[in-house]
Image: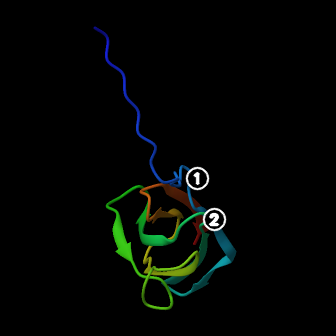
Amino acid sequence: LALSGERISEPFDIDNTPPTVSVVGSPTIAGEKVTVIFEATESSSYIRRAEYTVNGGEWKTIYADDGISDSRKERYTVSLTLPRSGEYSVALRVFDSSGNTGNSRALVKK
């Protein structure tokens, strides 16, 4: 008395590809102010949000330079005040609409 069944659905896409994140140029240092520019690109869906951290600390939300993360290509400018000399790691992680994450890191020597 074995039963079987099947159902055919409409085709759908599965996005397992993370966004690509890269540092644009070199970090700029002016006194205590440091600026790092990142660019994020998503091939399958769109970028939904981004966060940055300094030296592995707390992740902080950052908004795209155009005000909202809502397209396949976004630019993020991280502006920081770093009063002490030393080496700092500034990382950005980006989330796409499917929940995939991509990240990149810049080393800042002050």
Q: Is residue 14 or residue 52 the one in the foreground?
A: 14
Q: Quadrant of the image for the C terminus?
A: bottom right
Look at 53% across and 79% down and name the residue there: 71
Q: Which residue of the protein is positioned furthest toward the left in this rendering?
A: 1
Q: Position of residue 45 (x, y in %)?
A: 53, 67
The amino acid marked with disc number 2 is Ser
Q: Quadrant of the image for the N terminus?
A: top left
Tag 1 and tag 2, C-beta contact below 8 Å: yes
Q: Which residue of the protein is positioned furthest toward the right in this rendering?
A: 25
**Residue 20 falls in which quadrant of the image?**
bottom right
Look at 50% across and 88% down and name the residue there: 65
Q: Earlier in the sequence, mark 1 or mark 2?
A: 1
Look at 42% across and 85% down and name the residue there: 68
What colouring style does the render use? rainbow
Q: In the rendered image of this protein, does residue 36 appear above or below residue 51?
A: below
Q: Secondary structure at mark 1?
A: loop
Q: Which residue is mark 1?
A: 17
Q: Is residue 21 found left or right of 49 in the rendered image?
A: right
Q: Which residue of the protein is positioned furthest toward the top in this rendering?
A: 1
Q: Which residue is mark 2?
A: 43
Q: Is residue 40 or residue 79 the one in the foreground?
A: 40
